[in-house]
Image (cartoon, rainbow, N blue to C red):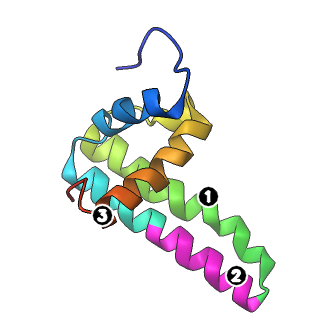
Amino acid sequence: MHPTAPFRSFAEFYPYYLGEHSNPTCRRLHFVGTSLVIALLAYTLGSGKWLLLLAVPVVGYGFAWVGHFFFEKNRPATFTYPLYSLIGDFAMFRDVLLGKVRL
């Protein structure tokens, strides 16, 4: 469910973002996708194979969107809040690592 008023900050957006990721399988798929994006970026930087950058959005969004469409059964926030959603992916990844969000 999308709010009626736009968010004024990421701090306002993040609780909404987490609410859109209540399904554990969706969160796991996001975590896998974000992990692969980080690994792919590191490999690309180390190898100089810059064409691999084209795979970054496919890997990241591919896992996330499967989680939303098949498990969470909602519309990814990326479509309405692309920047906040991208930041949210990495914030949730961090919070999983810190034990603040459960998989």
**Looking at the rendering, in which quadrant would you find the C terminus?**
bottom left
Q: Nearer the viewer, residue 8 or 57?
A: 8
How packed mark 2 is, by other alpha carbons closer than 10 Å (few <14, some 14-19, many 20 or more), is: some
Left or right, 37 with reference to 19: right
Find the distance from the CA under tag 1 to the CA under tag 2.
14 Å
Residue on which disc 2 sits: 44
Q: Residue at x 54, y 28 (%)?
A: 9
51 relative to 34, above or below: below
Give amino acid for label 3. Leu
Q: Is residue 54 above or below residue 50?
A: above
Q: What is the x, y in percent for residue 78?
A: 53, 37
Looking at the rendering, which quadrant does residue 55 occupy? bottom right
User: Is disc 1 in contact with disc 2, using a CB cutoff of under 8 Å?
Assistant: no
Which residue is tagged 1?
A: 57
Identified at 49% across, 10% down, the residue is 5
Which quarter shows the N terminus? top left
Q: Are there few (<14), some (14-19), or many (20+) residues within 10 Å of tag 3?
A: few
Residue type (three-letter) at the residue carrying disc 1: Pro
In the displayed structure image, the side of residue 57 where residue 98 appears, left or right: left
Does residue 22 lie above or below 34 as drawn?
above
Mark-to-mark CA distance, 2 and 3: 26 Å
SS of the residue under disc 3: loop
Q: Is residue 36 magenta?
A: yes
Disc 1 from disc 3: Cα separation: 25 Å
Of the two numbered discs 1 and 2 on the same chain, state the one appearing first in sequence. Answer: 2
What residue is shown with label 3? 98
Residue pictured at 32% horizontal, 39% vertical: 18
Q: Is residue 68 above or below residue 24?
A: above
Which residue type carries mark 2?
A: Thr
* First in residue order: circle 2 vs circle 3: 2
In which quarter of the view is residue 70 placed?
A: top left
Please state the extent of the stretch shown in magenta in the rendering. 35-47
